Image: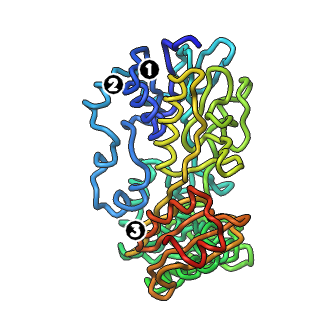
Amino acid sequence: MKTPESVVIAGASAAGLSVAETLRRGGFSGRITLIGEEEHLPYDRPPLSKEILSGKWPQERVWLRERAVIEALGLDLRLGVRATGLDDQARRVELSDGSTVDYDELVIATGARARRLPGTEGVAGVHVLRTLDDALALRAELEVSRRLVIVGAGFLGAEVAAVATLGGAEVSLVSDIPAPLADVLGPEVGGMLVDVHAAHGVRILAGVGVREVLVDGGRARGVRLADGRSVHADAVLVAIGSVPTVDWLAGSGVETGNGVVCDRYCQAAPGVWAAGDVASWEHVGFGERLRIEHRTNAAEQGMAVARNILAGDERKPFTPIPYIWSDQYDLKIQIHGLPRGADGFAITEGSLGDRSLLALYGKNGAVRAAVGVNRIRPARQARALVANGAPWAAAATNGSG
């Protein structure tokens, strides 16, 4: 296999930067073009809903690397420009400024964009939270708008609810699922989180969707629920998930669906790879196709892609144990593995009442995930049960040992 001379990375994200850094560490001396739609240097997203939204951090603190470190990588860095098209036969990427860039290997790391409620684009007071600019705009909003409705009770919605409530806002959390994160963590832990949020004053409206955003004078004034009730507020955050950024690949030979469709090596087509939130790949360990929108996976997948680009015929499947964390009030929730869709649940340390516990999740007779709530070390130790596919019956009785 011919050693590539040029690599183009579409997406100046955590995954994209990870690719670039790993290529350089691996001895790649060719041209690396890193394309980023935003003007900002590559930055970390998890703090956006916590430290940036609360104002605890200045925005520069979320940069993944200082400018001098980025410059030392010797990149053809193109910020403020996005990929708009791909000619996979000519191996050429088209950019929004009208230019093109050729490649030997392309890594798609364009991430995802926030999903919006229909008809809310451009409505004052309606926010999403995906980018640094989004977080700064919502923070400014909360300085003057004291009533916030959050549509969606996933990780993002629950974290913003905690930050906004601690900041003095009146928060209503609306979700069509029974409890915050219940679709991921199950009804037991989800129910505990409902109690925690309610104890801090969050109004929770669960099991009901949103029909529309109420607008008066061009500004959001709350939401109308599917059952006809109205929830009034000064601002609305829509936190109902995201959509992989793959529209620019239309007409190319790269298959897309729920993301860029890749094989076990994260390769989508000859000379084309994907990493991060946009990548849908075959996880041979879990035996299913995954697309994971979390920070740790982005960095790990970026490294794996870079290594496979350099490895030639010695490439390796990407088989991580997914890791997710969430901070809500004084709770640190850590998830190793895939709890969603589990058919077994057992608390092996602590209790829901103490709001400190280690829970195991099983599927098809094996441990599928370990979740710790304020149990950092036990959760880390229990990761081995997930990695080894430990028998469910024994693990649920004995815990992590």
Q: Nearer the viewer, residue 18 or 153?
A: 18
Q: Are marks 1 and 2 in contact (CB under 8 Å)?
A: yes
- 148 above or below 14? below
Which image quarter: residue 169? Answer: bottom left
Instruction: Please tell me which of labels 3 and 1 falls first in the chain.
Output: 1
Tell me the residue at 54%/74% (across/down): 359
- Picture coordinates of residue 168, whole percent (x, y): 37, 76
Sooner in the amino-acid sequence: mark 1 or mark 2: 1
Question: What residue sits right under mark 2 in the picture?
Answer: 73
Residue 81, visible in the rendered structure: yes
Residue that sits furthest to the left in the current view: 68
Seen in the image, is 186 located left or right of residue 42?
Answer: right
> Which residue bears the numbered disc 1?
32
**Is residue 190 depicted above or below 245 in this figure?**
below
* Position of residue 29 in the picture relative to residue 338 (left or right): left
The amino acid marked with disc number 3 is Ile
Query: In the rendering, at what x and y percent does residue 45 appear?
Result: 43, 50
Badge 3 local density, few (<14 within 10 Å), some, or many (20+)? Answer: some
Which structural element holds mark 3? helix
Q: Quarter holding the N terminus?
A: top right
Q: How many residues crowd mark 2 within 10 Å: few (<14), some (14–19), many (20+)?
A: some
Q: What residue is shown at x 57% (from left), y 23% (from top)?
A: 106
Residue 276 position, x and y percent, is: 54, 41
Q: Disc 1 marks which amino acid?
A: Ile
Q: Amino acid at mark 2?
A: Leu
What is the secondary structure assignment of the residue under circle 1? strand
Q: Nearer the viewer, mark 3 or mark 2?
A: 3
Q: From the image, tell me which residue sits under label 3.
A: 376
Question: Looking at this view, is 188 or 284 the one in front?
Answer: 284
